Image: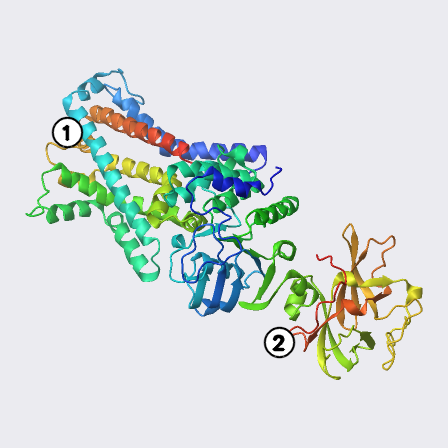
């Protein structure tokens, strides 16, 4: 499978007479109010969409815009409403309130078959009684595409997903990953302006999953006009693939931003905990970028022009497990329990230049191949620290010292139950380690 | 296999045969033996003969067989259409309405079939609905009786059908009728043929309602078996029963082959 961008440019040529190839309308939104031509760019807009089952609200006034050609991941735990949001776009649930717009067209009252979407679900749902090519042709036949066009478009869709050699097979004769490719080809064959992916990779094993993730990214490069709504509970998939991520929890939109924004500067404690599983510590501001956690005083990089929390205010400090590193015991500036950290007035620098030292007791050690995850009980919190593969990991019950750099901590105003705050508390730490995930 | 030990498995088989053979298999064997017998006064029948088969091979019995086959075919096709359609229509119903519809379709099975026969006789003996004395009333009675099974088996199959198929089809732009025709019915085909087989077998053996309704020129095989045994020709009746049994099994076997080819999963 050495596919390049040629598949997109071959496609219209193979089907003469097609008014709109996948490249038509590239970079331009459809005229407002007009139904989008197949294959042209069309975004999705949730306008205060609320979905309820009886007394339970499963999606609460969602406002979200997916720009044309954008990949938007809906990320959240199960029951967060992310799948419901996708099904509202597809037309399988009817919002109790609000509107869903596709390409500027209000589709709230339209049945699914009039919406012009492609959809791929977790269990593929390939039609078992049809061959691969018939599956892919299904949408074209249902839409009464001229007979002469069906063949080339099926071939192009199978080619794009690398399944051209399996056209005559039945779905049951394919592996899970191959079935997934056919399902994607089937959805792409109708040239939808919007592609809905509902946990498309969760039925695949880990190795196939990362392969398919790269495939999806490549497909999106080849079809830059297709807006993709990608529902997942897996933050790696969201961080890898999405232009922006919308984080949902308990039927509400918690946060929305680029993967970088969400990872570096989460706006809510939920986002911080869910994306990158940050340690969330309840701290008290002491002014000048110094925060108190129990007996420890911790320093966080201050950003000029951004006022920190007022002294005495409660705040939540987010520390990713991988920003914590273990100090050799002799490096720890003060290993005596109860007096750890710095004097209140002077943050100070440790003997080896360390700042922000946390002392704690190891409660668990998990070896993960390339890292050791240490579970450390410190100041009433259970900290997770991912430290490099250790020759001699600390024993459970040992006292150790962990440290982090001031610019690696993110502060959220308020306690741990903080909801969505206004604005970001700190701008993205510029250039501080671009590797995400 | 729930029984793991060898001895346990042998014991299970022994119990199975001791219970199964006398109850299910041997009575059929007795019928077959009787159909070849001239006389049965000892433990086994004596003087094997084909005379009964020759006797029933004449015009009347052949006519009765085709009558039965035609009735069962019409009744099961009609039942499948009506019951299947009703099951598809009732699928989206919830709560009380669904319960009422379900009960309505079970009604002909719940009441004794003699009552069904009598009610149809009373209902369709006056113009403008004068069906009494025609083949139609027999077919109608059979259809009413077996539709319940078609409705229930198609309904059960629909409940098991993964909604992801029809939703995927709809998202690809397929209208509901197209989805029904190209996706749901093909996926339901195994259940539909199973339901058809059940309806056919039930109709082939229906006696009590038929007895009240059949016109002289539309006498199904079970009625003739009953007539033969009633006038004392036990062995001739047995021969007719064997014909009924074999022809029903043959039709079911053919339908079973259709079913296996239509099984996709």
Residue B242 place in picture, x, y as percent: 27, 26
Where A107 falls versus B262 (above or below)? below
Callouts 2 and 1 in the same chain: no
Question: Relative to the observer, which residue lies in front, A87 or A44?
Answer: A44
Question: Relative to the observer, which residue lies in front, B154 or A239?
Answer: A239
Where B48 falls versus A165 (above or below)? above
Residue B6 lies in quadrant:
top right
Q: Which residue is mark 1?
A: B231
Residue B187 is left or right of residue B136, and the answer is: right
Write the residue at 67% across / 68% down. Answer: A266
**Can residue B265 be spotted in the picture?**
no
Residue A402 place in picture, x, y as percent: 83, 66
Q: Which residue is mark 2?
A: A422
Write the residue at 61% across / 65% down. Answer: A257
Chain on which label 1 sits: B
Residue B187 place in picture, x, y as percent: 40, 41
Residue A49 is left or right of residue A78, and the answer is: left
Chain on which label 2 sits: A
Residue A230 is left or right of residue A316, and the answer is: left
Question: Relative to the observer, which residue lies in front, A241 or A296?
Answer: A241
Write the residue at 30% across / 24% down. Answer: B32
Where A234 falls versus B262 (above or below)? below
Question: Relative to the observer, which residue lies in front, B117 or A401?
Answer: A401
**Can residue B197 be spotted in the picture?**
yes
What distance separates the C-alpha of mark 2 from that of mark 1?
A: 96 Å
Regarding mark 2 in the picture, which secondary structure is present there? loop
Looking at the image, is mark 2 or mark 1 nearer the viewer? 2
């Amino acid at each position: 499978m050495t596919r390049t961008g040629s598949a997109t440019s071959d496609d219209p040529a193979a089907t003469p007479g097609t008014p709109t190839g996948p490249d038509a309308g590239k970079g331009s939104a459809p005229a407002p109010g007009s139904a989008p031509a197949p294959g042209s760019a069309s975004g999705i807009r949730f306008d205060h969409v609320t979905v309820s089952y009886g007394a339970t609200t499963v999606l609460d006034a969602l406002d979200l815009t997916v720009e044309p050609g954008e990949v938007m991941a809906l990320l959240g735990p199960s029951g967060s409403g992310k799948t419901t949001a996708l099904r509202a776009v597809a037309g399988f649930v009817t919002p109790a309130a609000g509107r869903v717009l596709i390409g500027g067209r209000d589709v709230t009252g339209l049945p699914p078959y009039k919406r012009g979407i492609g959809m791929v679900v977790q269990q593929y749902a390939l039609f078992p009684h049809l061959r691969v090519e018939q599956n892919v042709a299904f949408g074209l036949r249902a839409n009464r595409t001229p007979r002469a066009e069906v063949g080339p478009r099926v071939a192009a869709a199978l080619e794009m997903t690398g399944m051209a050699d399996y056209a005559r097979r039945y779905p049951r004769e394919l592996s899970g990953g191959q079935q997934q490719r056919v399902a994607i080809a089937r959805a792409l064959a109708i040239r939808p302006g919007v592609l809905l992916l509902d946990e498309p990779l969760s039925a695949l094993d880990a190795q196939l999953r990362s392969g398919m993730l790269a495939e999806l990214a490549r497909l999106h490069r080849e079809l830059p006009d297709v807006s993709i709504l990608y529902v997942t509970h897996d933050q790696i998939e969201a961080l890898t693939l999405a232009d922006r991520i919308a984080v949902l929890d308990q039927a509400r939109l918690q946060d929305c931003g680029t993967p970088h924004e969400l990872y570096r500067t989460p706006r809510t404690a939920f986002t911080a905990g869910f994306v990158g599983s940050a340690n969330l510590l309840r701290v008290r501001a002491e002014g000048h970028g110094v925060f108190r956690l129990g007996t420890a005083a911790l320093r966080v990089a201050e950003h000029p022009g951004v006022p920190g929390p007022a002294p005495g205010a409660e705040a939540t400090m987010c520390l990713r497990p991988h920003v914590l590193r273990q100090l050799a015991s002799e490096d720890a500036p003060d290993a005596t329990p109860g007096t750890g950290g710095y004097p209140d007035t002077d943050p100070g620098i440790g003997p080896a230049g360390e700042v922000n030292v946390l002392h704690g007791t190891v409660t668990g050690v998990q070896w993960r191949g390339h890292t050791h995850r240490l579970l450390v009980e410190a100041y009433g919190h259970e900290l997770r620290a991912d430290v490099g593969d250790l020759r001699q990991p600390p024993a459970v019950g040992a006292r150790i010292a962990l440290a982090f750099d001031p610019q690696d901590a993110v502060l959220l105003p308020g306690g741990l139950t903080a909801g969505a705050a206004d604005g970001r508390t700190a701008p993205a730490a510029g250039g501080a380690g671009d590797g995400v995930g | 296999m729930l029984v793991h030990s060898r001895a346990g498995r042998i014991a299970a088989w022994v119990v199975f045969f001791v219970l199964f053979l006398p109850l299910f298999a041997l009575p059929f064997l007795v019928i077959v033996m009787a159909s070849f017998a001239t006389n049965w006064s000892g433990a086994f029948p004596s003087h094997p003969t084909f005379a009964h088969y020759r006797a029933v091979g004449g015009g009347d019995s052949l006519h009765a067989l085709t009558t039965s086959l035609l009735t069962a075919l019409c009744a099961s096709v009609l039942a499948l259409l009506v019951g299947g359609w009703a099951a598809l229509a009732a699928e989206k119903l919830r709560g009380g309405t669904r319960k009422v519809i379900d009960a309505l379709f079970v009604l002909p099975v719940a009441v004794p079939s003699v009552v069904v026969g009598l009610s149809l006789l009373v209902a369709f003996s006056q113009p403008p609905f004068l069906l009494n004395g025609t083949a139609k009333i027999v077919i109608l009675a059979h259809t009413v009786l077996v539709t319940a099974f078609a409705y229930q088996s198609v309904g059960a199959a629909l409940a098991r059908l993964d909604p992801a198929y029809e939703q995927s089809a709809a998202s690809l732009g397929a209208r509901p009728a197209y989805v029904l025709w190209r996706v749901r019915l093909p996926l339901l085909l195994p259940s539909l043929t199973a339901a058809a087989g059940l309806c056919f077998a039930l109709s082939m053996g229906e006696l009590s309602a038929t007895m009240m309704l059949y016109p002289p020129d539309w006498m199904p095989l079970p009625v003739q078996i009953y007539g033969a045994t009633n006038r004392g020709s036990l062995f001739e009746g047995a021969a007719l029963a064997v014909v009924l049994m074999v022809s029903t099994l043959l039709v079911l076997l053919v339908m079973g082959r259709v079913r296996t080819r239509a099984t996709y999963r």
